[in-house]
Amino acid sequence: MNFISRLFFVFKEGFLQLFRTSGLSTAVIVIVAATLLQLSLFLGISRVLDRALGSAREKFEMALFFTPSADASDRKRILGILSADPRVASVKVVPKEEAIQEFRKDPEIDRMLQALGENPLTDSFTVILRNDATENLNELVDQLKKDPKIEEVSYGKNEWETVSNLTHVARWVGLVLGGFVFLTALFIVSNTLSIALWARREDMVLLSRMGAPTWMRWGPYLWEGITQGFLGSLVVVAFLEAVRHGAGVALQKFGGFDLLLTLPSSEWWSLYLTLVFLGMILGALGAFLALQKKWVKELQ
Amino acid sequence: MIQAFHLTKVHSSGVKVLDDAYLSIPEGNFVAIIGESRTGKSTLLKMLGGEEKPTSGVLRIDHQDIYSLSTQEKHQWLSEVGMIFPDLRLFPDKTIQENIAFVLQVKGASGEGQEEAIGKLLNKAGLGSKAQAKPVDLSSGEQRMVLALRAMIFRPKLLLADDPFQGLDEKAAAVLFKFLLELNKAGSTIILSTQQMSFLGEAKKMAGEATIQWVQLDQGKLVPMEEA
């Protein structure tokens, strides 16, 4: 009972302190909100890129062209190899007649084909690959290229790798910039909270002289930081909800938040939870660092 | 049990306020240290409260050197100590009732009937009507009385009272002294200091059968009053 009563004291005092130094509390909430707003852009764009990459993976396919000498038994043999491979999702047979129909849709190519007089294309397979097969395809490609009845194996490895690498770089740049923004905010938040601590240093001394345990002396300040972080994150969530529900166009000029509009609802909520968590961590860490200052320790 | 051997304190100004002093106070005793101002009474009480390290000597409370305790142990020990020190203050944003209840909460001693008990105590001190007032609405004497009540409400094992009657009128001082006697009767060890020699006679009368060790600080040494 007494422990619960003391815990209640920590929460109550932490909450009341928000109002006792309301100016400083507002400053911390604004700093947290500004930081999370920047981080939401990094996090959101990272998610948009992830989705784009995932979408590219879904469309990832390979084209396999046979030599003119390949016959039905060769196609059957290769189909057997591909069907047995775990990296292959499905195989579509494209006869050369069907392929040329596709080419003839372009009038320029059609004129060229008419000049040739005969169908220069060979039969081909369109191989749809599994999403997770993109990392380890060289072995399969090499095996197919060695087959004497296969003229060419074509797949968008380079394009996919470029997109993948760009996403990777973008994620790291976002992480470094986001980390830098977070650390800068942490520094500012902890120093702002130390000003609040300085204003209430006599209370800290009193608690210490009363023999209050460390968690009771620190608790209100940590809780205050967590609450400020939470409130800061709520400001950002409210802003992003406004963007999501139509204010995006009007807010375009304030930064690329409209980019996030392609995200589905579940991603938005996941982003909000991440922001709330980061806000609370920022507040708690800021308060913890403020409590580690030498002069604060000397008060105890 | 409080024991001090070869206790010496030299302030940074070079003034020696305690000089090879000895002290032995069994648990549950009431010790009153009488002396002029600037004779080291406050320094001695601060030492006993773990706030001023002796320059040399040993100070043991319940067989522990309080200056070698870890921070956690020190706070644990302090949770059993009540202090009435002039530099302590009330929380300005809390009511008188809340200020007193607060210490119970901090010390983990709050419980049912707490408000009623605080109300009774305030009534006995003549401050019943000020329970919901803020400290700023009280006179300095009333504030000092509330500080004393705050230090006594949780029945500390050890109560250190540095000049607790300062700023109190005779009637309030007598009420406070009565509270101290009751607390001592309930088992608390009490060490108080005062420079009000005029109070001595009245206090001796009030103490009646209660045993109070009267000690004087004389040239940095603690001397029983009979010998002083």
Image (cartoon, rainbow, N blue to C red):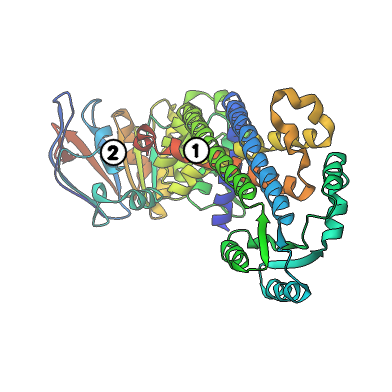
Chain under disc 1: A
Give how far apart the Cα atoms at labels 2 and 1 are.
34 Å
Judge by depth and name the residue closer to the eye, B187 or B225: B187
Is residue A116 visible in the rendered image? The answer is yes
Neighbor class of circle 2 (other Cα within 10 Å; few <14, some 14-19, many 20+) is many
Q: Secondary structure at mark 2?
A: helix
- Identify the residue under disc 2: B45
Q: Residue at x 75, y 26 (%)?
A: A252
**Left or right placement of residue A125 versus residue B55 in this view:** right
Q: Secondary structure at mark 1?
A: helix
| Disc marking residue B147 | none
Q: Quadrant of the N terminus of chain A?
A: bottom right
**Left or right placement of residue B156 versus residue B61 in this view:** right
Disc 1 marks a residue whose amino acid type is: Ala
- Identify the residue under disc 1: A287
Chain under disc 2: B
Disc 2 marks a residue whose amino acid type is: Leu
- Measuring from the top left, give residue B80's x and y in whole percent: 39, 51
- Measuring from the top left, give residue B97's x and y in whole percent: 59, 38
Q: Quadrant of residue A275?
A: top right
Tag in front: 2 or 1: 1
Judge by depth and name the residue closer to the eye, A67 or A222: A67
Is circle 2 on the same chain as circle 1? Answer: no
Q: Residue at x 38, y 27 (%)?
A: B166
Circles 2, 1 touching at the beta carbon (< 8 Å) = no
Neighbor class of circle 1 (other Cα within 10 Å; few <14, some 14-19, many 20+) is many
Q: Quadrant of the C terminus of chain A?
A: top left
Q: Quadrant of residue A225?
A: top right
Q: As displayed, is residue B209 above or below residue A145?
A: above
Judge by depth and name the residue closer to the eye, A220 or B103: A220
- Measuring from the top left, give residue A178's x and y in whole percent: 55, 37
- Please give the count of numbered marks on the rendered protein: 2
